[in-house]
Amino acid sequence: MSVHSTTRENSEFRPLHRRSAQCSSFAIPSKEHLRLNRTTSGFVYNAFMSFRAPQGNPNAAKRGRTPPPEDTFEEAAFLKALGEKQKSVSVKLMDGQVVHGWIEYYDKNMVRLTREGAPNLFIFKHEIMYIAEDGGKKR
């Protein structure tokens, strides 16, 4: 291996001068590499790369994250856990009312909220803004 070659003999790049033999950041393309590329108007480009910009939202590549899903399908598990543990919850309704109790039963469309000292409520899910745990157990 000569002084002018990089650490790999089959490398696509060769160093500009002797000191850059240890540092690959000072490298220019080899003849084999240039043969795979084409020159037009003085600019070198890779023949295998397309000139088209990636399709889709240009800001998506900058963000690097996908938006969260609309539904995580964890609603049933959350309601089941609250019902089994008889956790005290606050239910805020779409009209602004807040009711307290614990979830005794739920299905696809409604939740039964059991309350102490007040009538039990069957609340349609489309009327619920959110359900939050209050803290301690009921019973």
Image: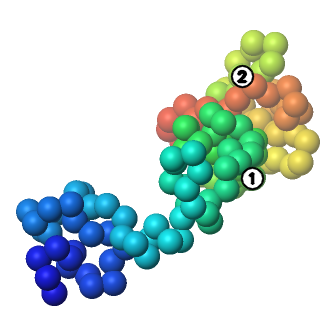
Residue denoted by label 2: 92
67 relative position to 94: left or right:
left
Q: Are marks 1 and 2 in contact (CB under 8 Å)?
A: no
The one of 13 and 103 positioned closer to us in this rendering? 13
The location of residue 120, given as percent across then percent down, is: 81, 32
Q: Marks 1 and 2, how far apart in space?
A: 21 Å
Q: Nearer the viewer, residue 82 or 4?
A: 4
Residue count near mark 2 (Cα–Cα under 10 Å), binned few <14, some 14–19, many ≥20: some
Q: Is residue 101 left or right of residue 93?
A: left
Can you say whether 92 is above or below 134 in the image?
above
Disc 1 on helix, strand or loop? loop
| Residue 129 percent across, percent down from the top left | 75, 25
Left/right of residue 31 with respect to residue 20 in the rendered view: right
Q: Which of the two residues, 129 or 66, is positioned nearer the viewer here?
A: 66
Q: For mark 1, what is the residue?
A: 73
Identify the image quadrant of the N terminus. bottom left
Quarter assignment of residue 11: bottom left
Q: Residue 14: horizontal and vertical position, in percent?
A: 27, 69
* Outermost top residue: 96
Query: Quadrant of the image for the C terminus?
Result: top right
